[in-house]
Amino acid sequence: MKEMKKAYIAAIGYALIIGLSFMFVKIALTVASPLDTLAHRFTVAWIVATVFLICSKNKLQIGLKDLQRILPLALLYPILFFAFQVFGLARTSSSEAGIIQATIPIFTLLLASLILKEKTSFKQLICVILSVLGVIFIFMMSGAGAAKVSFIGSGFILLSAITSALYNVFARKLTQQYSLFTLTYIMTLFGFIGFNGIAISMNVFNGTTKQFFQPFFHIDFVLAIVYLGILSSLITSFLSNYALSKMAASKMSVFSNVATLITILAGVLFLQEEFHYYHLVGALVIIIGVIGTNYFGRVVKKVL
């Protein structure tokens, strides 16, 4: 029970950090390009992780075969997930992006049933669908995606949701085989190498190499990138890996809908985005779905 409580705390912490991250991504994108933002984000994350590795007693005991096993997971998260997310956020509002990403639980539930053979009760399935319907209700009422440019952004966010669902499923297995710090560090390292390699190559090709470090002269960008690098990249990787090591992938993924609520509130409070009654109605439906999914998930476990 203590371990499960810690897992739920980790899942809630993950949701809070991710929910606020959309706002900080929007701030960072006002100064830097999407690729440069990702490169700087994972540079900060990797530096902090490396400092922690040097100062702590943790040692990475990992071989080539282990890297080959972790690489597909790192491609899903952080590389593809954050790449799709940041390009989507460049073309849509943070509230809309958060709403679309709330479809992660339904994708995870389906994939977990097919790949991990996780058992799901009918009541649990209804609660997951209820949570997603709350998101769809907000989405339909807000009329998001009416513009062509918004459809493009929504497409990128939807792809990020699918990659996140795949990560939830495959990380569930790897968290049983490797330490949380090892997984988190290797995933961060791949993100650092991948995004910096692409961003630097693009800047060299476009002749904009001098602009690569210019965003750090803006205090808003520095604060945003520190949040995104340390909290939203490094810490969330650790929290999600920990939660997935203790609970089913379908139960963990539904907490992404809590992140949706945080995203909407952050967009309203800090980015002056509109908030309507249907946001509140949808939020209540989402919360009921999240609580129901985890409650009936415990019931299934006790019966088994």
Image (cartoon, helix red, strand yellow):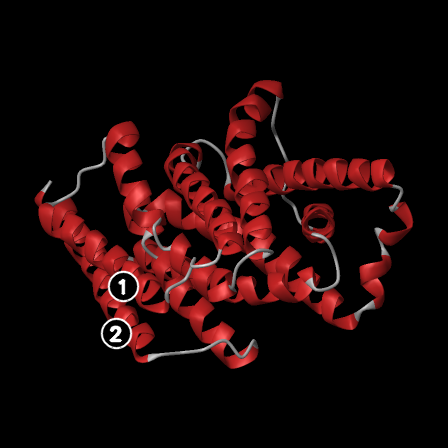
Q: Which of marks 2 and 1 is in front?
A: 1
- Mark 2 and mark 1 lie on one chain; the one further toward the N terminus is 1
Instruction: Determine the residue positioned at 31% across, 68% down.
Output: 141
Q: Is residue 245 or residue 274 the one in the foreground?
A: 274
Relative image position of residue 31 (x, y in whole percent): 75, 63
Q: Is residue 98 or residue 41 the one in the foreground?
A: 98
Residue at numbered disc 1: 137
Residue at numbered disc 2: 281
Could you say whether the residue bearing mark 1 is in a helix, strand or loop?
Answer: helix
- Label 2 with label 1: CB-CB less than 8 Å: yes
- The relative height of residue 138 versus residue 243 in the rendered view (above or below) is below
- The relative height of residue 284 versus residue 17 in the rendered view (above or below) is below
Relative image position of residue 185 (x, y in whole percent): 62, 42
Instruction: Determine the residue positioned at 22% across, 53% down.
Output: 128
Residue type beneath disc 2: Val
Relative image position of residue 268 (x, y in whole percent): 48, 78
Relative image position of residue 7 (x, y in whole percent): 37, 55
Q: In which quarter of the image is the C terminus?
A: top left
Q: Quadrant of the N terminus?
A: bottom left
Indicate which disc residue 280 carries: none
Instruction: Determine the residue positioned at 46% across, 66% down.
Output: 95
Instruction: Determine the residue positioned at 86% across, 38% down.
Output: 204
Residue type beneath disc 1: Phe
Could you say whether the residue bearing mark 2 is in a helix, strand or loop?
Answer: helix
Query: Can residue 283 be seen by looking at this rendering?
Result: yes
- The relative height of residue 133 versus residue 118 in the rendered view (above or below) is below
Residue 183, image quadrant: top right
Q: Using residue 12 as the reference point, say whether residue 44 is left or right of it.
A: right
